[in-house]
Image (spheres, rainbow, N blue to C red):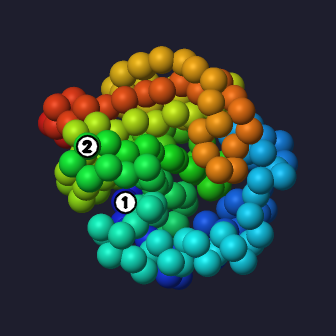
């Protein structure tokens, strides 16, 4: 059984553990520059603050993915422009759930939170071009491939080629009907 909910303070250590127990190989595979990672304490403080802020004050809006009632990953948006667009990120924590369609199901459940909470016209995701899992998942969900380009996508990333995938509100509404 798959479900999605907003982050709670008790989830912060789970997300911190995901990031700080990941192997260097896994982090680099996601496009992370290991030298840019904040300390555990800095990361926990940021997540805790974001979880406590009202919707309009969040720089990052985070959801927890659950499988069989247990936290199994998280999905968040940042670069939020209310009524316009936001950038989405997705992380399935436990490798045993990967490559089985769980991410696709969980993102589909998360989309209403993002689109409706922030009244988005467009949601986009820019995974590392060399990380096949999120790129396949976004394509399967019906996101439209917009372009491939080189950038530093976030404050913990190295310069990399990313694939930009987009989902308009109209296309999101069509997905809900399926």
Look at the numbered disc 2 and give the secondary structure of its residue. Answer: loop
Q: Quadrant of the C terminus?
A: top left
Instruction: Tell me if label 2 and label 1 are in contact, CB under 8 Å.
Output: no
Q: Is residue 128 visible in this depiction of the protein?
A: yes
Mark 2 and mark 1 lie on one chain; the one further toward the N terminus is: 1
Look at the numbered disc 1 and give the secondary structure of its residue. Answer: strand
Q: CA distance from mark 2 to mark 1?
A: 26 Å
Position of residue 39 measured from the top left corner of the image (x, y, whole percent): 77, 69
Instruction: Give whichever of 80, 18 is nearer the camera.
Output: 80
Residue plotted at (44% across, 45% down): 88
Q: Quadrant of the N terminus?
A: bottom left
Position of residue 80 measured from the top left corner of the image (x, y, whole percent): 37, 52
Mark identifier at residue 126: none
Position of residue 135 measured from the top left corner of the image (x, y, whole percent): 53, 28
Establish if 145 lies above or below 111. Answer: above
Rendered image quadrant of residue 94: bottom right
Q: Is residue 58 left or right of residue 129?
A: left
Q: Are there few (<14), some (14-19), or many (20+) residues within 10 Å of tag 1?
A: some
Q: Is residue 109 visible in this depiction of the protein?
A: no
Q: Is residue 122 left or right of residue 139?
A: left
Establish if 174 lies above or below 10. Answer: above
Residue plotted at (77% across, 53% down): 36
Residue plotted at (16% across, 37% down): 173
Mark identifier at residue 84: 2
Q: Are there few (<14), some (14-19), or many (20+) residues within 10 Å of tag 2?
A: some
Residue that label 1 marks:
3
Residue plotted at (55% across, 71% down): 47
Q: Is residue 16 left or right of residue 5?
A: right
Q: Nearer the viewer, mark 2 or mark 1?
A: 2
């Amino acid at each position: 059984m798959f479900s999605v909910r907003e982050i709670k303070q008790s989830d912060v250590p789970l997300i911190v553990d995901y990031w700080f127990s990941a192997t260097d190989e896994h982090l680099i595979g996601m496009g992370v520059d290991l030298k840019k990672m904040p300390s555990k304490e800095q990361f926990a403080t940021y997540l805790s603050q974001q979880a406590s802020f009202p919707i309009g004050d969040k720089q990052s809006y985070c959801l927890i993915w659950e499988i069989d009632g247990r936290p199994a990953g998280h999905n968040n948006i940042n670069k939020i422009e209310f009524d316009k667009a936001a950038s989405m990120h997705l992380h399935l924590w436990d490798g045993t759930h990967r490559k089985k369609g769980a991410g696709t199901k969980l993102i589909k459940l998360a989309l209403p939170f993002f689109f409706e909470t922030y009244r988005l016209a467009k949601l986009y995701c820019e995974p590392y071009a060399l990380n096949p899992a999120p790129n396949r998942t976004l394509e399967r969900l019906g996101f439209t491939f917009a372009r491939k380009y080189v950038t530093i996508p976030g404050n913990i990333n190295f310069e990399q080629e990313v694939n930009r995938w987009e989902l308009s509100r109209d296309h999101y509404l069509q997905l809900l009907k399926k």
